[in-house]
Image: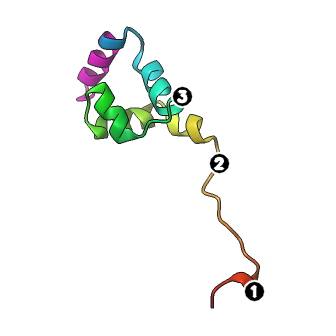
Amino acid sequence: MTKYDSYREKVEQRHNKALVEVMKDLYIKDNVGPSVGAKQLGMPRQAFVYFVREYDLKTLKFGDSKKKMMFFPARQMIR
């Protein structure tokens, strides 16, 4: 049993659905960040981030897009 299983059980019992569904509702649908989401679920921010990574919710939220870089023509760059 990992240290995060107790948080998972508490949230699942309180919301009567799987943690992944609760996390999807908060993190993706409601666009709530880790600090606010953790507070709403009654868990530490570190646990919330752990579950975001475990369920790969960042990919669902932001898609497969990587950090986009802006490219400026040479004349627009500061020298």
Q: Is residue 56 visible from the viewing direction of this image?
A: no
> For the residue labelled by badge 2, is the local secondary structure a helix, a strand or a loop?
loop
Q: Circle 2 sits on which residue?
A: 65
Nearer to us of marks 1 and 2 is 1
Query: What range of the chain is rendered magenta?
Result: 1-13
Up the image or down, 31 lies above or below 73; here it is above
Q: CA distance from mark 3 to mark 2?
A: 18 Å
Q: Which mark is residue 75?
A: 1
Residue 77 painted magenta: no
**Residue type pointed to by label 2:** Ser
Closest to the observer, 1 or 57: 57
Q: Earlier in the sequence, mark 1 or mark 2?
A: 2
> Residue at point 59% right, 42% down?
62
**Depth check: 2 or 72 in front?**
72
Disc 3 on helix, strand or loop? Answer: helix
User: What is the magenta segment's predominant secondary structure?
Assistant: helix
Return the mark for residue 29: 3
Residue drawn at x 65%, y 48% as measured from the top left: 65
- Which quarter of the picture shows residue 48? top left
Q: Is 60 positioned to the left or the right of 73 in the image? A: left
Q: Is residue 20 left or right of residue 77?
A: left
Number of other residues with Cα within 10 Å of mark 3, as a class: few under 14, some 14 to 19, many 20 or more? few
Query: Pointer 1: residues within 10 angstroms few (<14), some, or many (20+)?
Result: few
Position of 2 with respect to 12 (left or right) is: left
The image position of residue 23, as x and y in percent, is 44, 26
Q: Quadrant of the N terminus?
A: top left
What's the residue at 63%, 40% (across, down)? 63
| Amino acid under disc 3 | Lys
Cα distance in 3D space between marks 1 and 3: 41 Å
Residue 50 lies in what quarter of the image?
top left
Residue 74 is situated, as x and y percent measured from the top left of the image, at 74, 84
